[in-house]
Image (cartoon, grey):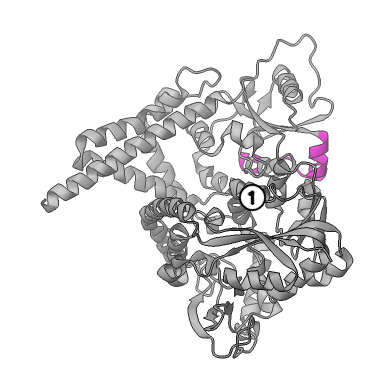
């Protein structure tokens, strides 16, 4: 086969894949649209004064809701047991409606307690109790649709299984403002530059397919062009404004919006006092270098004391791009892998800052909110062995696991323990009953015997002394109680294949990575009997190839806008970062496909990138 034939074959396959993806996306969007209930407001004899008793109506500027629609929304909420209703305008423009349907599956998001809250950004009906618990009684009124996007995400957390969506014909909204597209994407917790780069890459692919594979390329282009009409054509409920114009001009408008978004980076937004203070604080900390963040290097293994560990990985901070270099060493006797030299408590504070909370909080929450299936699998592991009554989740972070596990064990009391402030926010949201803030070994004495189940999901690898954490679990568990542990598997072949770009190395946060044999021995020495061991079932999807692609792209051009950046924030550096992210989009897509295949293999062979153990503390 000649080079031209091979190129043509690749183009035909690419075009066929585009047709398949666009067709599936169109069908999915219509299915989701059909799942949106449509309010049917009856004419009002007497007009109530909004907001209705027991409810608060929150709208973006320029949005009006007639009294009949408001009453219909409240009646719908009461019938469906909802505490929050996002009102979707029936006249919402086509691209905004399609964008919402890409993010929101109304049926699945209603029952998925961890699913992020996405809305139309125009009007919300909120019950009194949720409004009060979310602290909205003292909050200023929304100033833009972006504020509503942020707010619905927050409210979904306070009503995780009582948030719904409805099409509201009586909702009048102002026209969409394309200039605010980047701001609105950020408010949804999405990366504007990456999404815009992906959109431009998709348009470029359509053009290439038209030239190289005209038949398939024409089919893909037509499907993309007509998608607004195919999804939002004559269906029950929505009547998007300017549907015909939006369909006709779609490719040009999409390209213009993507280019405008790429040209308006976050750095051009007005700086705030908080951002300036954060930048100044990092500058002061880094003025003295990073050496003080590390302890002296130890000459032996912290697990078995064998001397002479060998270097396994040397890397930088590929997660946030903070200054510093980190080394993982491996014991030649027991295989334990550990950070050497280890970070000091001050160093841990520096490198954890703005990851789970602060600047990185939204991104981390978005990732954690997409793991509902994993959370349910962890909770279900106990079903053949016990019915948990009092469960302590150690290292709970924002308590996403506990929130999801309530659907599996609705009668169980879930408490959480973590170093961060997020544990108290989780208690306010109702995701846990009690939040304990602090170090587990230091709190164990006052929690002795209070729980029949303790879980540590991707927690032990973050700790300074994993054996002390296991000793604490022994104290806290009542006799016959169960300990559930999930960890990255340092024996995974992907770790050697991907080197420092293997995501589970997770430097500089992970300090210890234990082979499963080591952990089983440690549990047996503390009086535990192993009940279940899973490897493939504990595999973390997208934790290998996609994770490596993201880390590699991030390392090529670190974010110059980060407050800890050590290089000047210039237009050239921002442009270079955007270019790298755009060029990496095809790599991300390929890595996503490889990870899907990797997950199938991991499930079939029971060899993944993580493992899960369930053990029982024996009586006496």
Q: Which residues are magenta?
A: 128-148
Instruction: Specify the principal SS of the magenta part.
Output: helix
Q: Is residue 228 above or below residue 372?
A: above
Left or right: 277 as drawn, with respect to 602: right
Q: Residue at x 54, y 86 (%)?
A: 309
Residue 308 can be seen, yes or no: yes
In-front residue for pair 536/78: 536
State the image coordinates of residue 448 (x, y, percent, origin top left): 87, 65
Quadrant in the picture for residue 460? bottom right
State the image coordinates of residue 3 (x, y, percent, origin top left): 13, 53
Identify the element where label 1 is drawn: helix
Task: Tell me if mark 1 has few (under 14), some (14-19) or many (20+) residues whose alpha carbon lies within 10 angstroms of its own.
Answer: many
State the image coordinates of residue 193 (x, y, percent, origin top left): 47, 53
Q: Is residue 307 above or below residue 555?
A: below
Residue 514 can be seen, yes or no: no
Left or right: 386 as drawn, with respect to 283: right
Residue ranking furthest to the right: 446
Q: Is residue 114 above or below residue 162?
A: below
Q: Residue at x 32, y 40 (%)?
A: 17
In-front residue for pair 108/158: 108
Residue tagged by mark 1? 375
In-front residue for pair 603/399: 603
State the image coordinates of residue 259 (x, y, percent, origin top left): 41, 48
In-front residue for pair 334/313: 334
Left or right: 44 as drawn, with respect to 598: right
| Number of marks in picture | 1
Does 129 appear in magenta? yes
Residue ranking furthest to the left: 2
């Amino acid at each position: 086969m000649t080079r031209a034939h091979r190129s043509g074959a690749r183009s035909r396959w690419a075009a066929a894949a585009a047709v398949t993806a666009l067709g599936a996306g169109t069908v999915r969007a219509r299915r989701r649209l059909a799942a949106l209930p449509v309010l049917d407001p009856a004419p009002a004899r007497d007009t109530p004064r909004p907001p209705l008793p027991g409810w608060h109506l929150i709208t973006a500027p320029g949005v009006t809701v007639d009294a009949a629609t408001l009453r219909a929304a409240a009646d719908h909420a009461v019938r469906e047991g909802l505490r929050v209703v996002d009102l979707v305008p029936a006249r919402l423009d086509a691209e905004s409606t399609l964008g919402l349907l890409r993010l929101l599956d109304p049926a699945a998001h209603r029952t998925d307690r961890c699913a992020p809250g996405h809305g139309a950004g125009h009007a919300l009906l909120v019950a009194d109790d949720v409004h009060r618990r979310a602290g909205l009684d003292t909050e200023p009124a929304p100033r833009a649709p972006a504020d509503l996007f942020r707010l619905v995400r927050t409210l979904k957390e306070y009503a995780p299984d009582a948030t719904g969506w409805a099409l509201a014909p009586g909702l009048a909204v102002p026209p969409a403002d394309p200039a605010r597209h980047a701001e609105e994407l950020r408010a949804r917790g999405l990366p504007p530059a990456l999404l815009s780069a992906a959109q431009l890459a998709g348009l470029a692919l359509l053009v290439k397919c038209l030239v190289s594979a005209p038949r398939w390329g024409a089919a893909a282009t037509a499907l993309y062009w007509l998608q607004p009409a195919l999804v939002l054509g004559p269906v029950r409920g929505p009547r998007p404004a300017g549907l015909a114009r939006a369909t006709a001009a779609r490719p040009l408008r999409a390209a213009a919006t993507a280019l405008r978004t790429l040209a308006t980076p976050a750095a051009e937004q007005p700086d705030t006092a908080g951002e300036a203070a954060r930048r100044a604080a990092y500058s002061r900390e880094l003025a003295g270098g990073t050496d003080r963040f590390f302890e002296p290097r130890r000459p032996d293994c912290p697990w078995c004391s064998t001397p002479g560990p060998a270097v396994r990985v040397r890397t930088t901070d590929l997660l946030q791009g903070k200054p510093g270099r980190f080394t993982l060493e491996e014991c030649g006797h027991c295989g334990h892998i550990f950070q050497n030299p280890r970070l000091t408590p001050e160093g841990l504070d520096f490198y954890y800052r703005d990851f789970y909370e602060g600047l990185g909080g939204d991104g981390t929450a978005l990732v954690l909110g997409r793991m509902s299936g994993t959370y349910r699998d962890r909770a279900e592991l106990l079903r053949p062995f016990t019915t948990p009554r009092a469960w302590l989740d150690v290292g709970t972070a924002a308590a996403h696991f506990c929130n999801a596990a309530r659907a599996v064990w609705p009668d169980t009391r879930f408490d959480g323990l973590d170093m961060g402030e997020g544990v108290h926010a989780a208690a306010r949201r109702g995701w846990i009953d009690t939040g304990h803030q602090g170090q587990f070994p230091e709190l164990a004495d006052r929690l002795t015997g209070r729980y029949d189940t303790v879980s540590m999901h991707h927690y032990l690898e973050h700790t300074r002394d994993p054996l002390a954490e296991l000793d604490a679990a022994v104290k806290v568990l009542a006799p016959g109680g169960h300990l559930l542990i999930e960890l990255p598997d340092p024996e995974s072949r992907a770790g050697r294949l991907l080197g420092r770009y293997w995501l589970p190395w997770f430097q500089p946060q992970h300090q210890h990575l234990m082979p499963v044999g080591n952990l089983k021995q440690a549990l047996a020495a503390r009086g535990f009997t192993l009940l279940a061991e899973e490897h493939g079932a504990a595999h973390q999807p997208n934790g290998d190839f996609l994770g490596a692609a993201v880390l590699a792209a991030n390392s090529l051009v670190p974010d110059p806008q980060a407050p800890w950046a050590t290089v000047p924030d210039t237009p050239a550096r921002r442009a270079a970062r955007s270019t790298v992210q755009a060029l990496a989009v095809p790599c991300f897509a390929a890595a996503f496909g490889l990870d899907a295949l990797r997950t199938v293999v991991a499930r079939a062979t029971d060899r993944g990138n993580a493992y899960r153990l369930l053990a029982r503390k024996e009586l006496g």
